[in-house]
Amino acid sequence: MMEGRDFLSKEESKYVFGYRDRADDCYEVARSVYDGRYLYIRHFMPQLPYYQNALIFNKGGSYTEMNRLRDAGELPDAAKKMFATKPVEILYDLQEDPLEQNNLASNPEFENKVAELAGELDEWMIQNRDTGLLTEGIMMQQANQSNSNVYEISRAYSTASFTEVLKVAKMVGKITQLSEVIPYLESEIDAVRFWALIGIDAYEGDIGKLTVKIQEMLSDEVPAVSSKAAEILIKYEENQVAYKVLGELLLLEDEVQVLQAAISVRRLGAKAKPLIPIITKEILPKYSGEIWGRYKNWSYPMFIGMALDQAQLNCGINVPTKK
């Protein structure tokens, strides 16, 4: 089921809403609202660049040229932004700045416009139970457990519960003290725990004081949560228990949950090396096939395979990839 608005209707809409979510093995959660002149964008995962280190961005064509210019240090400043972390909030005046180069979000003159559009976006996300905040792994797990579907799962969230999820998701990229996020790591709402971990992942300071708590979350019954906890711990201290947990998650039968773990493995960069034996001997053979000469089908096996192929490349292992 898809929701939308009749574009042939004579009823006028004051705002147009947009979104960006997962593409292949690249998660992203970004939302926008446009009032006919000003475009407001909120990045819920600002720590991730637009152009992630993934096979989807290495498919030849214009990507090849982008990568060549990047490696040669010849990218123009505007293009360099594609490889950097993102602002949490962006405001563009498309009348004066149609190429979207001047972010006005922190300009005091536009404080009221930012507040207006941010408020409209919040209301729209809550009203429509925006599933991007519930995350794919969590929604699919809950749907399977209740023998329902993700639409019903999203509608089962009360306004108060969903508002709590949005509140924590909006903290990502804005946390100044880790104490701000600690209460949400113990929330009964799965998506709140997930977003609390995303907030920690985006935090630019030392997370050492939270490693014990994060290690406790390795046993979380929600794979999307435990895989993110493992990813954070390995990036911080190459935690051996976290490696074990990620390896076990990769062996699950539920392909949606395996994808969560595979994406975390890809994000480890060269630190994924201890997982390479299980990836090459047990995981990839399970998802191999004729698609691109590598993957079993065009759905989750391809996404999982792409993530784990990139993980091998990150560890210096040459694998054939589709160009």
Image (cartoon, grey):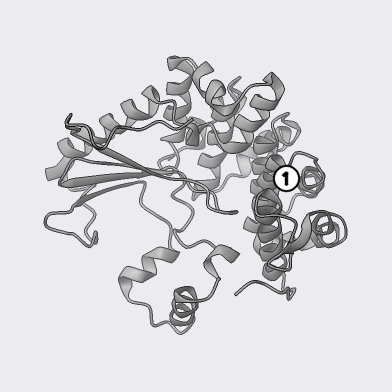
Q: Return the residue nearer the eye: 283 or 267.
A: 283
Label 1, secondary structure: give it. Answer: helix
Q: What residue is drawn where x is 48% and y is 27%? A: 165
Query: Which quadrant of the rendered structure holds the C terminus?
Result: bottom right
User: Is the residue 148 above or below the residue 173 in the image?
Assistant: above
Q: Position of residue 42 (x, y in %)?
A: 35, 43
Q: Position of residue 216 (x, y in %)?
A: 72, 32
Q: Specify whether 59 is left or right of 293.
A: left
Q: Specify whether 283 is left or right of 168.
A: right
Q: Quadrant of residue 267 in the image?
A: bottom right
Q: Specify whether 199 is left or right of 307.
A: left
Q: Residues within 10 Å of mark 1 (few under 14, many from 20)?
A: many
Q: Amino acid type of disc 1?
A: Val
- The residue at the far right in this view is 281
Q: Return the residue nearer the eye: 73 or 6.
A: 6
Q: Which residue is mark 1?
A: 258
Q: Is residue 53 visible?
A: no
- The residue at the far front in this view is 8
Give the number of marks.
1
Q: What residue is drawn where x is 17% and y is 38%? A: 113
Q: Quadrant of residue 18 in the image?
A: top left
Q: Is residue 177 visible?
A: yes
Q: What residue is drawn where x is 58% and y is 34%? A: 194
Q: Return the residue nearer the eye: 1 or 210.
A: 1
Q: Quadrant of residue 19 in the image?
A: top left
Q: Specify whether 169 is left or right of 153.
A: left
Q: What residue is drawn where x is 82% and y is 45%? A: 251
Q: Position of residue 10 (x, y in %)?
A: 16, 31
Q: Position of residue 270 (x, y in %)?
A: 69, 65
